[in-house]
Amino acid sequence: MSNTPRTTWQLGDRTVNRLGYGAMQLAGPGVFGPPKDPAAARAVLRAALAGGVDHIDTSDFYGPHVTNGLIREALHPYPAGLCIATKIGARRDAQGGWLPAFSREELTAAVHDNLRNLGLESLDVVNLRAMFSVHGPAEGSLEEPLAVLAGLREQGLVRHIGLSNVTAGQVRDARRMVPIACVQNHYNLVHRDDDGLVDMLATDGIAYVPFFPLGGFSPLQSAILSGVAARLETTPMAVAIAWLLQRSPNILVIPGTSSLVHLRENLAAASLVLPGDAVAELDAIAATS
């Protein structure tokens, strides 16, 4: 782990700042329905770009069709350097449940929905979310859905293909079928099942984008994390983001928030360099959890 992390990495054919923004929390409770204050949500998006964010992660199944609409309202026409990554492969039921949407028709419709709701002619990055299990990666063939995405890429509707909620085996198989720009899995200071995958992708120059970098709907809680933050006179969440940025240069961090205050705290984490003794303490959290 480097003590002086690099600030940018490749995402497809773009060079982006490693601290981006995840739009999921802009939707209503449970990522379902609209936010209570759409104007505040749009203000957060504008503040993210003003703070140097040039990579936004979103999906049309957030809401559904909520966050993409907010992004378009707040930021369109988009600045030339902005990379918007979206996800397909799932849908929502009437109660907000998460269901697979892997057929050719569903995947094709999802790409067109994202294009329309974002106001784009081509999507920078489309992550295929593997929904063999809602609760985490599970083995299963991605050959057919990847063939659909490859066809949409040939039509110019998709520029780069990524993967989400996948196993290391699925990543290896997918890379034999199509170029993979990034992998987006659950990973943070405590949840470190993908340590080996992170390192493998770094060797090959492929971005790894951890979702729930701050623990998700239940924020990371650790006496060690809180102690390190107090010693460095910052917040536990800033330390958790800084740890990810120092963990490996290919990690792109996309913390999400609907709060301007929390957004500013998250952005400040990009300049926080953790000393070696703090990193050693933090690494021990996963070993004991």
Image: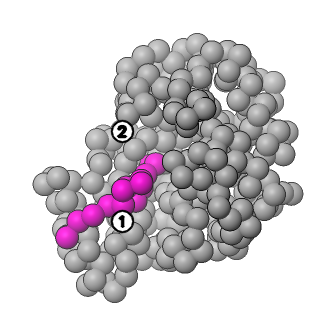
Q: Residues within 10 Å of mark 1 (few under 14, many from 20)?
A: many
Q: Which residue is mark 1?
A: 240
Where is residue 75, by image quadrant? bottom right
Q: Farthest front residue?
A: 95
Q: Position of residue 88 (x, y in %)?
A: 62, 32
Disc 2 is placed on an element classified as: helix
Residue at image x 78%, y 62%?
A: 74
Residue at image x 55%, y 35%?
A: 95
Which is more toward the observer, 237 or 55? 237
Amino acid type of the residue tagged 1 in the rendering: Ala
Q: Position of residue 82 (x, y in %)?
A: 73, 57
Q: Position of residue 11 (x, y in %)?
A: 60, 47
Residue at image x 41%, y 65%?
A: 241
Q: Which residue is mark 2?
A: 197
In the displayed structure, does residue 101 sit left or right of residue 82?
left
**Disc number lying in front (1 or 2):** 1
Where is residue 121, by image quadrant? top right
Compared to residue 266, the image places residue 20 above or below, namely above
Q: CA distance from mark 1 to mark 2?
A: 19 Å
In the rendering, which numbered label is found on residue 43?
A: none
Q: How is the image coloured?
A: one colour
